[in-house]
């Protein structure tokens, strides 16, 4: 019976180690779930067997003469407690339980790594930073570099930083407007009416997909926030409270559009220090 308990606790430790290794290698939800199930099932099985099979149960009534037990009973009780197979003195079981709990507790610390930036930058700074840098070319979704002539008036083109097409905070859109209709200077400036703004809505980070031709407005279809590009992409309808961040651009000597800096403000939804 003791062996079954020890094996249950060891299975719990193996499951916890498997969870830690799987998480450390990048994580796979199904395997992490299996490992945690093995860890907790092994621990529960061991404790259940220990409690039902080895720990005395039931109520007992015994008459005693006086307060002090007879010497024979004292000796018998001492022998039981000192016996190596006593449930109270089973060192192997206690050691196996301590080992299982230690390993399981250590494995539970691994997910905390996801809450900490490993480059040791402050979380707020990490949220403000995107792959856009001075000199980074604007490319389309298929990686084709963009020229000013690729964005005629009234056309919207989704753009990305060259080499970082998968960056979640970097998508932007380029659109050419009539500069004489600007009521406010775009945050990132413009090149003969060509402006670039973040594609992420400042309400919840959804992509701003719809351009209302002729009005100079873009619409987020998720929660109906609308931004006026003639007024510096200020929100004019919906729950968004901040304008879309602008991306400063220039035309390089090779004729392609390049960024001159990062977005004018952190893209996407607000966070704890920025509503």
Image: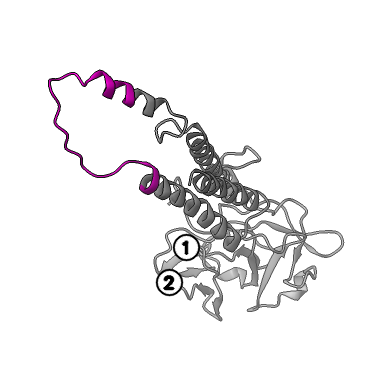
Left or right: residue 63 versus residue 180 is left
Residue 65: in magenta span: yes
Q: Circle 1 — which element?
A: loop
Nearer the observer, 105 or 83: 83
Nearer the observer, 231 or 162: 162
Name the residue tied to disc 1. Answer: 204
Q: Is residue 23 visible?
A: yes
Q: How many marks?
A: 2
Q: Residue at x 53, y 44 (%)?
A: 6
In the image, farthest residue toward the right? 254
Q: Main secondary structure of the magenta part?
A: loop
Q: Position of residue 232 (x, y in %)?
A: 53, 62
Q: Position of residue 40 (x, y in %)?
A: 48, 52
Q: Residues within 10 Å of mark 1 (few under 14, many from 20)?
A: some
Residue 188 image-quadrant placement = bottom right
Quick check: 249 above or below 98?
below
Left or right: residue 82 versus residue 178 is left
Q: Are marks 2 and 1 in contact (CB under 8 Å)?
A: yes
Name the residue tied to disc 2. Answer: 223
Residue 112: in magenta span: no
Residue 224 image-quadrant placement = bottom left
> Whole-Å distance between the Cαs marked 2 and 1?
9 Å
Q: What span is colored magenta in the figure?
A: 52-77
């Amino acid at each position: 019976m003791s062996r079954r308990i020890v094996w249950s606790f060891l299975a719990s430790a193996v499951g916890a180690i498997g969870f830690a290794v799987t998480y450390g290698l990048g994580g796979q939800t199904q395997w992490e779930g299996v490992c945690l199930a093995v860890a907790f099932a092994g621990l529960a099985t061991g404790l259940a067997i220990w409690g039902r099979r080895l720990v005395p149960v039931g109520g007992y009534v015994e008459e005693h003469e006086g307060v002090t037990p007879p010497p024979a009973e004292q000796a018998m009780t001492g022998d039981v407690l000192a016996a190596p197979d006593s449930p109270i003195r089973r060192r192997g079981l206690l050691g196996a339980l301590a080992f299982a709990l230690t390993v399981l507790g250590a494995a539970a610390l691994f997910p905390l790594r996801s809450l900490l930036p490993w480059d040791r930058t402050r979380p707020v700074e990490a949220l403000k930073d995107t792959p856009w840098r001075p000199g980074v070319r604007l490319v389309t979704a298929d990686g084709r570099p963009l020229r000013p002539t690729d964005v005629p008036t009234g056309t919207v083109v989704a753009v990305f930083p060259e080499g970082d097409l998968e960056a979640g905070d970097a998508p932007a859109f380029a659109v050419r407007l009539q500069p004489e209709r600007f009521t406010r200077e775009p945050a990132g400036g413009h090149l003969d009416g060509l402006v670039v703004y973040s594609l992420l809505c400042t309400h919840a980070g959804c992509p701003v997909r719809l351009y209302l031709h002729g009005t100079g407005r873009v619409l987020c279809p998720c929660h109906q926030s609308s931004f006026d590009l003639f007024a510096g992409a200020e929100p004019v309808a919906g729950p968004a409270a901040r304008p879309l961040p602008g991306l400063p651009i220039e035309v390089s000597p090779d004729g392609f559009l390049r960024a001159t800096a990062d977005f004018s403000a952190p893209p996407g939804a607000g966070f704890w220090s920025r509503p």
